[in-house]
Amino acid sequence: MGTKLITVGTRHVKVWKIEEQTGSMRIKSRQSDVSFLSGAMHKTLPGRNCILDGLKDATFTSVVPIAPNRAIVASDKGEICLLDDSGSEHRFSKLRDAGFPVSSMAVDIKGRLHIGGSLGGIKTVYVDDILKAVTPPPSPPPRIESPTITAIDCNQIGAVGCLSDYVITVDSQRAIRLSYLCSVGDESMVGDTLHMLPAHGDAVLGVNAGLSQSNSLKASYYTWAADGTIIFWNEGSSTGSIQVPLEQLDGPDAIVNELRTARVLSDGSFLLTGDKYGVLR
């Protein structure tokens, strides 16, 4: 969100301040050639927790920026919330109810929010419409009444991303689908599927389409999996992949580390990753 980092989770929404460039990973080529910058050190970022009020027991699953100081946050119960950091304090409030558990969200170029669910459906609504909630919002907040589109045969949607013409969904069977951004004659619905691609050998945890047309990777979007693999795609074809090294703790009871999030600069020059242990690189 702007120059700030937002993390969400169980009873947790936090805004972190990025003070300086540290420990980034530069992409040397499109075929798994990655290296750490010298002197990379683990460093705790300064941050502040949002006051959750009535949502203090919620588990938040997804966050998507809609302005330099505003983001929409969703929970596994379907709460759709607004995080506003435009003032001296973070303001966090519930706006709507999706009507199903939310697993991922994305905003497209038409200003529409695509809400993916763990039951295999997508709801599409204009961001401006859900921001029209009165202050304070009514109790309970209204549900989003747009139709639910079953996009992946009831497999859980793990990630949603948007290109200029397509919506990308990744499901629990590790399949990637490219669907037309709008159904013919109805902008409130996602259109037909254009491509269905086999993806990673491990659980696919995310997709992102924030790449410029002239990026060095020659890709329009990328996906990442728990085992640290990142695959770059140009619509229906792979343009390359890299393997992110993951630290693992020793011991029989150690939690296995996973790659949880990844962001590539729009020109494809640098990669920022976050793992299950809470380490950003």
Image (cartoon, grey):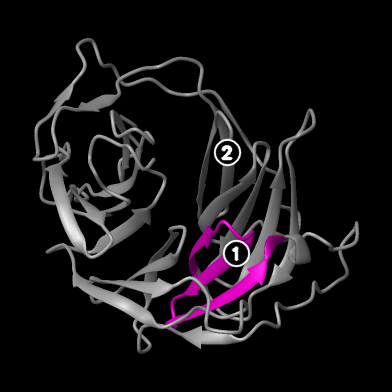
Q: Amino acid at mark 1?
A: Leu
Residue 281 shown in magenta: no
Q: Quadrant of residue 130?
A: bottom right
Q: Amino acid at mark 2?
A: Met
Q: Is residue 1 above or below residue 153?
A: above
Residue drawn 32% across the image and 77% down it: 194
Front position in the image: 71 or 259: 71
Q: Is residue 140 above or below residue 264?
A: below
Whether residue 225 is visible = no
Residue drawn 14% across the image and 42% down it: 242
**Label 1, label 2: how far apart the Cα atoms are:** 16 Å
Residue drawn 59% across the image and 74% down it: 124
Please give the residue where the numbered disc 2 appears in the rendered image: 1
Q: Give the extent of the magenta segment.
A: 103-127
For label 2, the SS is: loop
| Mark carried by residue 113 | 1
Q: Is residue 194 left or right of residue 48?
A: left
Whether residue 99 is visible = yes
Discs 1/2, front: 1
Residue 116 shown in magenta: yes
Front position in the image: 2 or 29: 29
Q: Is residue 72 above or below residue 121?
A: above
Q: Is residue 174 left or right of residue 17?
A: left
Q: Position of residue 95 (x, y in %)?
A: 75, 63
Q: Disc 1 or 2, which lies upstream in sequence?
A: 2
Q: Position of residue 21 (x, y in %)?
A: 40, 17
